[in-house]
Amino acid sequence: MLEAAAYLETENGRKYLAQLCKHFAHKIEVSYTETQGECRFVCGTAILEADDKGLRMVATSDDAQGLAETQSVIESHLVRFAFRENLQALDWRQDEAARTP
């Protein structure tokens, strides 16, 4: 299983977690609370964790292509929802580096 993680420092982490999960729930299996979410895509899974300081996103997949696709789906939607923050590309870290923000 491959894994990559990214962190967005923002006071709107919980808001973005809810927006992402509600949006994806129209098409895929999603479970979420105010601070945690899991989105199960065909290409992989995204785990979201939010607090007062930001939003941590962990993408997992069985292969590199699925991991890249999962990262892309999460990032492209987050950029759209967080347009007021003028986001640049997220800094995705893979495997061991993914475990530390």
Image (cartoon, rainbow, N blue to C red):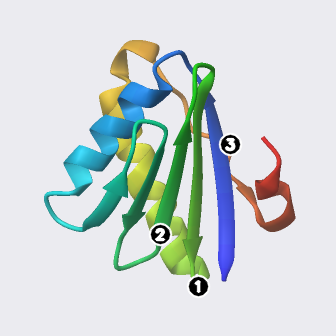
Q: Does dot 2 land on a helix, a strand or a loop?
A: strand
Local crowd size for mark 1, using a 10 Å CA cut-off: few (<14), some (14–19), many (≥20): few
* Quadrant of the image containing the N terminus: bottom right
Local crowd size for mark 2, using a 10 Å CA cut-off: few (<14), some (14–19), many (≥20): many
Provide residue 59's location: percent of width, then percent of height: 56, 62
Q: Earlier in the sequence, mark 1 or mark 2?
A: 2
The amino acid marked with disc number 3 is Asp
**Eyeballing the image, is 18 above or below 39?**
above
Q: Which residue is identified by label 1? A: 63
Q: Of discs 1 and 2, which sits in the foreground?
A: 2
Provide residue 18's location: percent of width, then percent of height: 33, 37
Whole-number angstrom distance, CA of label 1 to CA of label 2 = 12 Å
Q: Which residue is identified by label 3? A: 91
Q: Nearer the viewer, residue 3 or 30?
A: 30
Q: Of discs 2 and 3, which sits in the foreground?
A: 2
Whole-number angstrom distance, CA of label 1 to CA of label 3 = 19 Å
The amino acid marked with disc number 1 is Asp
Q: Does dot 1 land on a helix, a strand or a loop?
A: loop
Q: Which residue is identified by label 2? A: 45
Local crowd size for mark 3, using a 10 Å CA cut-off: few (<14), some (14–19), many (≥20): few
Residue at x-position 65% and y-position 45%: 6
**Eyeballing the image, is 19 above or below 71?**
above
Q: Cβ–Cβ below 8 Å for labels 1 and 3?
A: no
Q: Earlier in the sequence, mark 2 or mark 3?
A: 2
Residue at x-position 37% and y-position 13%: 84
**Eyeballing the image, is 67 above or below 14?**
below
Quadrant hosting residue 17: top left
